[in-house]
Image (cartoon, rainbow, N blue to C red):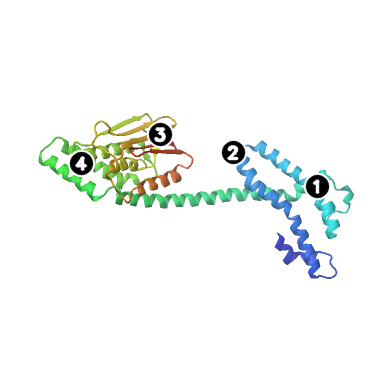
Amino acid sequence: MWLKELFFGFSTYNIEVLTFSSMLSILTVKLITLVFPLLIFYTNFLALVPWFIRTRKIFLYFVCLIALFLMLAPLHKYVYASLLPHKFGWYSYAYLDKLNIWLSFQTLLFENYVYIFFSIAISYVSEYIDTQKKQQELEKAQAVTELAYLKSQINPHFLFNTLNDIYALTYQKAAQAPSAVLKLSALLRYMLKESNDEMARLDKEIEYLKNVVELYEIGQKGYAYVDLRIDAHQKDRYIAPLILINFVENAFKHGVVNDPDNPVKISLSAQQDLLEFEVWNLKNSDQKDPTSGIGLANVKRRLDLIYPEQHELKIQENKDMYRINLKLAWK
């Protein structure tokens, strides 16, 4: 708006000789008068729209908008009745003695109402663009997380050990063999197929967790002690797939699993309003893994992207134990 005066405005002013001084005076005046639309636009864009329109407090919005114009009215009167005429010889009103607060209020309202509409429109357009960016970022993060999960969690060591254990059960004609094969099949099917969806049913995620725990116990040949407790009254709810398993895998990987007096404790509670998930384990001081923490960082990032302001993750640890508590609001 200010540069418009520089390129197109001078021909409209009654200036006998266009000098550098007159140019500077006009541009200074226009810069001063631009303060009012700037204040109105950005106050509405940065404060009033987010605080009141987005929260559906329309009455308070109009009250604050009128208050904004009332606060600017004395400044408007001073600028146009005193500052511009006396300092720059600029007269925007023929009768300066009639310019009062009420007239300034009306002038501000009718000259700047268009900036109110512009600021509201741009605010919603900006929100739409931000939403699209976040969605793209979420899709990329989910793809990276899935790849990282397949590489780090379903590793050959776990898979081959499980297959060897199943082979041994089959060779011995143990009653556990068919069940173990089905659990491994269901686990792989969930990870490679159903987890590609944006959301998964909670009952399928619970079944997946149970399969992981039971296959891990098979792999430890009876020396793994896990206390798994499920209290899910809302199994038909939906949850981001593979969002919980990292915490369980960390407990198996870095915790003490062979102490019957202090088993790894895993609890999941799905109630009407939220899901609460907790994992507790003693620390294994012999475990030294340079990649420790990568999986946790990934799941924190996914939580931030998928459940913004809808989750609470608390981590407690000392030299002996490690506990995570996660609360998710249903989407």
Instruction: Name the residue tied to disc 3.
Output: 275
Amino acid of disc 2: Thr
Q: Look at the image and tell me in which quarter the N terminus lies.
A: bottom right
**What whole-number distance in Å separates the C-alpha atoms at marks 2 and 4?**
53 Å
Mark 2 or mark 4: whose residue is earlier in sequence:
2
Quadrant of the drawing holding the C terminus: top left
Of labels 3 and 4, earlier in sequence is: 4
Q: Nearer the viewer, mark 3 or mark 4?
A: 4
Q: Which mark is residue 104?
A: 1
Cα gap from disc 3 to disc 2, whole angstroms = 26 Å
Residue 245 in the image: state x and y as whole percent.
Answer: 33, 41
The mark nearer the N terminus, 2 or 1, is 2
- Secondary element at tag 1: helix
**Badge 2: few (under 14), some or many (20 or more) residues near its Cα, within 10 Å?**
few
* Residue 187: quadrant of the picture: top left
Give the Cα separation between the discs numbered 1 and 4: 81 Å
Name the residue that disc number 2 marks. 55
Q: Calculate the distance from the C-alpha at mark 3 to the C-alpha at mark 4.
A: 29 Å
Mark 1: which amino acid?
Ser
Query: Quick check: marks 1 and 4 in contact, CB under 8 Å?
Result: no
**Disc 2 + disc 1, Cβ < 8 Å:** no
**Which numbered disc, 3 or 2, marks the residue closer to the eye?**
3
Q: Earlier in the sequence, mark 1 or mark 4?
A: 1
Give SS at disc 2. Answer: loop
